[in-house]
Image: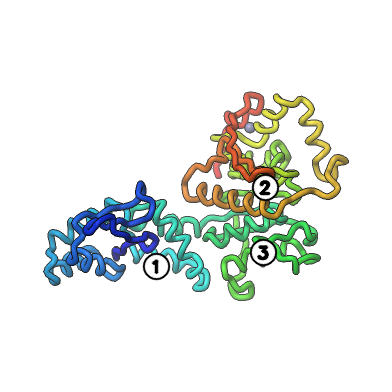
Amino acid sequence: MRLALKTALSRSWRDSDTLQFGTVSRHAGVLAHADRALCDFLGLVDGTRDRPALLAEGERTGFGRGPAGTVLDLLEEAGVLDDAEASDRALARFPQPHRELLGPDLASLSLIHSTPGAAPAVLAHRADRAVEVRGAGRVGAALAAVLAAGGTGAVGVVDSGRVAPGDCSPAGLPAGDVGRLRSTAAREAVDRASARHPARHSRRPRPGLPDLVVLAPRDGSGAFAGGTPQARELLRAGVPHLYVGVVEEFGVVGPLVVPGSSACGHCLVLAREDEDAAWPRILAQLADDGPGRAPAPACDTALATAVAGLAALHVQVFLDGGRPPSVDGWCEISAVDGMPRRLRLKGHPDCGCLWQPVPPH
Ligand SMILES: [Zn+2]
């Protein structure tokens, strides 16, 4: 393990001999009695030496082996040390141009997973994950591109038809793609986001089930897709899935369904039905080619981009082993005021999704 001070942390002086790592004081690491000799020693913690070598350097430079060990312990305790060797190994899993783009992402992970080597382990784990995005409209294409950029190893996009002007956004499909096959255009957006040359680094679909499926139909109905045949199939197969969409002036992220352990999309449909008995009848008319569909659906570009970004963040948190707020809940963002809200979702007693046995994944 070659130790390095985390490059993502700023360094500032709280007073003449107290050094602060990081900007926000409640999260920052602080090193007291930071004199010239200690600062010189910190200069050696640059990712080129392991701990024994740093102790030897401490002795050789006159700083002292004991003080060097104490400083390294304090730095690790403060969460400001990283393992440069593990970082290099994790980044080596990506093509060279993508490695450079991933630098800030890995730096961000190093602040979330603070022990040396933890962040590279999370990035390497992410590189092994596969996500399938169903729907390549203004939300889905942007979401797929963001996931690929962030290091998710395999991002598949499933859609049919050709790119319409309403599918385009700066974060997803460019306006120049209008008229092209949507699946091809979306795959290219994913390749661009991860700096892959399609001819040299073509992404082949991975065999088996993805680790997560995002349901992001272009018309925003993904927000209400609970109980549909594809949702039931994902539940049966034990595949985690996330509902995402923009409906009228509302953006929705969630629920993220972990089959057998969190409330599902059908629970949400049933909860809405409890509030509005006509909801299933309305929903049926919004389904594919239903008579109630809006002739020209609304989709604010900024709202769609915010929804895609928030959904991508929730997917990453989930893939990295966390529990995003869209599990047993969902998040709404309104284009009226831009205010995100989190709403809680309980398993509905009439759904039964939480007592059905989950088949092996
Ligand atoms: Zn359910």
Q: Which of the 4 image quarters holds residue 13?
A: bottom left
Labelled disc at residue 187: 3
Instruction: Please name the residue that numbered disc 2 is placed on.
Output: 215
Q: Amino acid at mark 2?
A: Leu
Crowd rating for badge 1 (residues with CA inside 10 Å; few <14, some 14–19, many 20+): few
Instruction: Please report the residue visible at 37 percent of the width from the left and 59 percent of the height from the top.
Output: 9
Residue 357 against residue 249 in the figure, above or below: above
Location of residue 177 (image quadrant): bottom right
- Kindly indicate the quadrant of the structure image that contains residue 11: bottom left
Image spot of residue 214 (x, y percent): 64, 49
**Left or right, residue 184 beside residue 292:** left
Q: CA distance from mark 3 to mark 2?
A: 17 Å
Mark 1 vs 3, N-terminal side: 1
Placement of the N terminus among the 4 image quadrants:
bottom left
In terms of image quarters, where does ligand 1 lie? top right
Q: Quadrant of the C terminus?
A: top right
Residue at screen point 33% across, 53% down: 115
Say few, some or many: other residues with alpha carbon within 10 Å of mark 2 (under 14 / 14 to 19 / 20 or more): many
Q: Is residue 131 visible?
A: yes
Rendered location of residue 28, percent (x, y): 34, 51
Mark 2 and mark 1: span between their CA atoms? 34 Å
Along the horizontal axis of the image, is 315 left or right of 187? left
Q: Secondary structure at mark 3?
A: helix
Q: Secondary structure at mark 1?
A: helix
Q: Looking at the image, is mark 3 or mark 2 earlier in the sequence?
A: 3
The secondary structure type at the circle numbered 2 is: strand
Callout 3: 10 Å neighbours few (<14), some, many (20+)? many
Which amino acid type corresponds to the residue marked 1 in the rendered image?
Asp
Residue at numbered disc 1: 88
Depth order, front residue of 114/158: 114
